[in-house]
Image: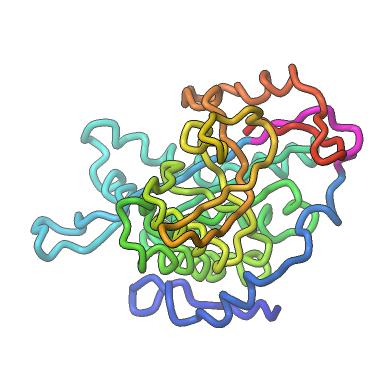
Amino acid sequence: MNDATLPEMIDGIPNISGAEAQVENATRAAAPVFLPDTNLRLDKLQAVFAIALHMQQPLIPAGGPDLRSADIISNLDLMLRNPGIGDNHNATVFLDCYGRMGSIIPELVSAGKNPRVMLDYSGELFYGLRKMDRGDVLERLRGITCDPHLRKHVEWLGTMWGHAVASSTPVPDLKLHMRAWQQQFAAVFGWQALERVRGFSPPEMHLPNHPDVAFEYVKALKECGYHWLHVQEHTVENVDGQGLGYKHLPHRLLARDSRGEEVSIIAIIKTQGSDTKLVAQMQPYYEAKGLTRQQVGGISIPPIVT
């Protein structure tokens, strides 16, 4: 696909709609993204673990003293403007963290290592960084997103543009949020980068529990070209109502609405054991060390701890 530049902002407003045809074209890609380029010996792997970094900063009416007329700015921008309040002095550290994978991954690769990471950045964060003239943070990520030598080490995950939790979002807005993120991502990193985004990270790892809403949610994901999504193990169950028997294999998430219509998508289970949210802890790694290959449909595959 032509990687022509798409403006990130138009008259100060995030450019999150209007290019639906191009977005749909980019997200129709079906060919494998990583399989042709991987340097992993898939037949030799006994078990694997995966990590995803979730990054978000909300937009708030704080660009001025009067909330009724204040400009909408990033919460991070507010922190930088008021360094003496609370822990706002950490704002510069946050900024560095948002771009730091753009330095860590090349350093590891140049040292002969073989890193892997998934990145989940909200559209609000993309827009907020650009609006506060910190596009340098996004530029730090460009190499690991677009460079053919580095991009196999990083998988971007799609999400809702405004970090919208599914059950609190009107059903007609679900697809709009998904498409808005896709257009924003293409504006930041290009159409070819968007073609490589196949997985989806739900804000707060949240799934709707109403059958009709869950159906529309999965349907929207499919229509937006996503192949799989992350789910937490305690938010899903087997079709017989029992808990998951084996949580380290890909599952098929089946959503059935009140009319009996069904839609499904691959689900990668995020296990409760990795949900303590301790900084710099690598529970998935230690859990994976105790696992071995499993048989699925007569095929031996390594289990994945996410």
Measured as percent of width and height from the top left, residue 181 is found at 47, 63
The image shows residue 162, relative to residue 19, as above or below, that is above
Identify which residue is drawn at 47% across, 26% down: 277
Determine the image quadrant of residue 36. Answer: bottom right
Q: From the viewer's side, name the closer residue of 74 and 284.
A: 284
Colour scheme employed for the rendering of this structure: rainbow
Quadrant of the rendered image containing residue 299: top right
User: Residue at (57%, 42%) from the top-left corner?
Assistant: 100
Quadrant of the rendering where the C terminus is positioned: top right
Residue 58 is left or right of residue 253, and the answer is: left
Residue 178: x and y in percent read 47, 63
Give the image quarter of residue 240. Answer: top right
Q: Is residue 123 visible?
A: no
Left or right: 288, with 139 as reference point = right
- 56 in relation to 218, above or below: above
- Nearest the viewer among 284 and 265 is 265
Residue 163 appears left or right of 66 = right
Q: Residue at x 55, y 53 (%)?
A: 200
Please tell me whether residue 107 is drawn above or below residue 279 in the rendered image. below
- How many numbered dots are placed on residues in this image? 0
Q: Nearer the viewer, residue 89 or 42?
A: 42
x%, y% of residue 82?
Answer: 23, 43
Q: Is residue 31 located in the magenta-colored stretch of the structure? A: no
Say which residue appears at 70% left-offset and 69% top-offset.
29
**Where's residue 118, x and y in %?**
62, 44
Q: Is residue 193 visible?
A: yes
User: Which residue occupies the foreground of this view, 186 or 65?
Assistant: 186
Residue 43 shown in magenta: yes
- Name the image quarter holding the N terminus: bottom right
For residue 69, above or below residue 299: below
Report the magenta residues as a range: 40-50
